[in-house]
Image (cartoon, grey):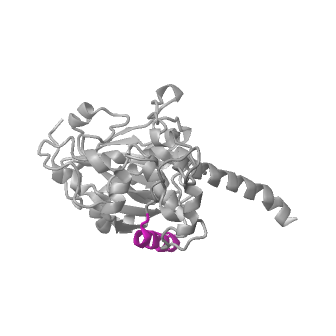
Amino acid sequence: MQNMKEEEVNCCQIQEWYPNFKSVSIKTLIHQLPEPFVEYLLDDSGPFLLPASVLNEDALPNRIRNPDDEEDFQVSEGSDDEAEESPPPPSFPELELKVKESIESLGGAVFPKLNWSAPKDSAWISTSGTLRCTTFSEIALLFRASDSLVHDLCHAYDSCHDKRTSRPQHFFLALRKWYPSLKPDMEFRCFVQNQKLVGVSQREVTTFYPVLLEKKNDIMLVIHAFFNNHVRGKFGLENYTFDVYITNDERVKIVDFNPWGGFTLSLLFTWDELEHVHGEGDDVEFRIVEDRCGVRPGLKTAVPYDYLDTSQGSGWDQFLRNADQEMRNQHRSPEAGA
């Protein structure tokens, strides 16, 4: 495996590649994150608190926490359970307003990510079990619950032989338009070495999809043509990977770029295999899960320690309240339509 450089990692940040590939990617709006919000994501010194607006669902998007609500999170002076006052929940009114406007312009629902990573490991905490977000508070909840985002925040350059820093100068929030009908069997990872497409792997390797056996040759032709027409020579590296999604009408959309090696998963290949692929002409090694015996285990996701705190005002407490409210709304809806 060749040594990775910081510049290779930097090229794969979404704010770097998206402007050049927006016409063949998923519609995305990107915001630079203020440093206090980055510090909020990294802070594990106290109880987990969501941004202030989530504590008052009727609050305006840029509203700072109402002091009248503080009584709900304090212990009366002189009580038997007297304790220190809870810290005030954080507030990021300007960022929240920008996010609200972006979500509305993208159709009302988005899936979020940082410079490189999406909080896929924290989808368990969403009431929908997905990364679908309609509010700033839902994004904050996913981000705070995610272990994978710690990679972006603290370890993005750990595989670089010329590592000079532990984090990029700025972090960005990418809000990507949510499509409810996307099918995981139509997402693929493409491996490019010396500006040549050498390998393609099924992206979701934990499942056997019979349809891929039927469409394998057609899919490979579509991906290879897309690479030649839209990617080859237009990305700033010689060696890299990129993920694509193929729509029902066989249009190809770029989902992401990743460095060659390092933290990037090689999926149905090994990196040693990819290093030594020397296909002739335009030959590309395309791998899919051929049968149910070929599936790979998924990544295990543990519940972050923060969420063991179920006290009033904690992130877990708020999640349970939201889930309970959603259930009540569902029970009421048939009556409303009667």
User: Taking 286 as reference, is 183 left or right?
Assistant: right
The answer to whether residue 218 is seen in the rendering is: no
User: Taking 46 as reference, is 192 left or right?
Assistant: left
Q: Is residue 97 magenta?
A: yes
Residue appearing at x 23%, y 52% in the figure = 167
Name the residue at the right extreme.
338
Task: Tell me if residue 103 comes above or below residue 133 in the rendering.
Answer: below
Residues drawn in magenta:
91-106
Q: Nearer the viewer, residue 308 or 156?
A: 308
Q: Nearer the viewer, residue 221 or 206?
A: 206
Magenta span main SS:
helix
Q: Nearer the viewer, residue 12 or 303?
A: 303
The answer to whether residue 42 is seen in the rendering is: yes
Residue appearing at x 82%, y 60% in the figure = 334
Q: Is residue 58 magenta?
A: no
Task: Tell me if residue 62 comes above or below residue 282 in the rendering.
Answer: below
Q: Residue 151: where, in percent of width, then height?
A: 31, 45
User: Taking 92 as reference, is 325 left or right?
Assistant: right
Q: Quadrant of residue 30?
A: bottom left
Residue appearing at x 44%, y 65% in the figure = 91
Name the residue at the front extreme.
78
Q: Residue 170: where, in percent of width, then height?
A: 26, 61
Q: Residue 75: where, in percent of width, then height?
A: 56, 52
Task: Tell me if residue 195 comes above or below residue 24 in the rendering.
Answer: above
Residue appearing at x 43%, y 46% in the figure = 146
Quadrant into which the C terminus falls? bottom right
Quadrant into which the N terminus falls? top left
User: Taking 77 as reference, is 194 left or right?
Assistant: left
